Image: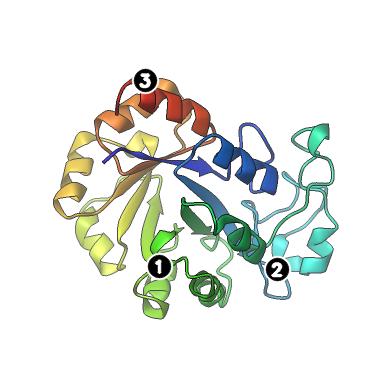
Amino acid sequence: MATKIFAHRGASQYAPENTMPAFEKAIEMKADGIETDVQLTKDGIPVLIHDESLKRTTNGQGFVYEYTLDELKKLDAGEWFSAAYKDTPIITLEEFLTWVKPFPILINLELKNNIVDYKQLEHKVCKMVKEHRLEERTIVSSFNPESLKRVKAIHSGIETAFLTSQGIRNIIPFLHEIKADALHIKYRVLNYRLVKQCRNENIPVRVYTVNRAFRMARCYKLKCEGIFTDMPDVAYHKRLQNNF
């Protein structure tokens, strides 16, 4: 099976991350999946934004959890990237799932709860995925192992993936302990032994964030289950060019 290409926060090299323009470009660039980040507003609505702070990717200040959805919707999440994207809004998980449902692609929802452990985040996300009947196409990932346990307790049929930027000894028993179905690793952690070890246990390995062509080729050669990239078009053509 060919390595799947996930557009990291959408095609975020070409449009502001975690916004509709970035997601639309991911579809145009033939990504196999879209990865995005989920946090909760002050009034408990799941929204798509990576940083806990609003400063980097919007014209707002403070933290996501300090704002209601109505307040967040008034912010500009696009002009920081380019004037062409001025007034691009933050979108909700509900809006994203409604939009993405007709497209035959995978969905990776990263729960941003390793710093702010949002109460009920797992329940709200699982409920929405189930309501849209997207369980079989959805992967829920997190750096927070306790969060993955909660996801499995809520909905055992949704795939979970543990995110890490570090090598972990005895990784297989650890993944079993936290009930993670897959492993998502930073590129620097990638090695043949780890991939083989996980493959022997039927544990998918996906790698982030892979933007250089030679790194993409290495992931393809090792037959990783997936890569996360800001440039899905480059990844697509590299895979096609080398018949991976």
Amino acid of disc 1: Leu
Task: Identify which residue is drawn at 41% across, 70% down.
Answer: 146
Viewer-proximal residue, 126 or 106? 106
Amino acid of disc 3: Gln
The residue to which callout 2 is attached is: 41
Quadrant in which residue 210 is drawn = top left
For the residues labelled 1 and 3, the Cα–Cα distance comes to: 37 Å
Viewer-proximal residue, 87 or 98? 98
Amino acid of disc 2: Thr
Would residue 232 be seen by someone viewing this image from the given angle? yes
Residue 44: horizontal and vertical position, in percent?
Answer: 67, 75
Disc with the residue nearer the chain's start (1 vs 2)? 2
Task: Identify which residue is drawn at 22% across, 42% down.
Answer: 195
Q: Is residue 215 above or below residue 2?
A: above
Tell which residue pokes out farthest to the left in this image. 200
| Count of numbered marks | 3
Image-based side of 136 in relation to 89, left or right: left
Which numbered marker is on residue 241? 3
Residue 117: horizontal and vertical position, in percent?
Answer: 55, 69
Q: Are marks 2 and 3 in contact (CB under 8 Å)?
A: no
Residue 223: horizontal and vertical position, in percent?
Answer: 25, 36
Disc with the residue nearer the chain's start (2 vs 3)? 2
Would residue 11 be seen by someone viewing this image from the given angle? no
Q: Secondary structure at mark 3?
A: helix
Task: Identify which residue is drawn at 83% across, 33% down.
Answer: 83
Residue 177: horizontal and vertical position, in percent?
Answer: 26, 68
Q: Are marks 1 and 2 in contact (CB under 8 Å)?
A: no
Name the quadrant of the C terminus. top left
Disc with the residue nearer the chain's start (1 vs 3)? 1
Which numbered marker is on residue 148? 1
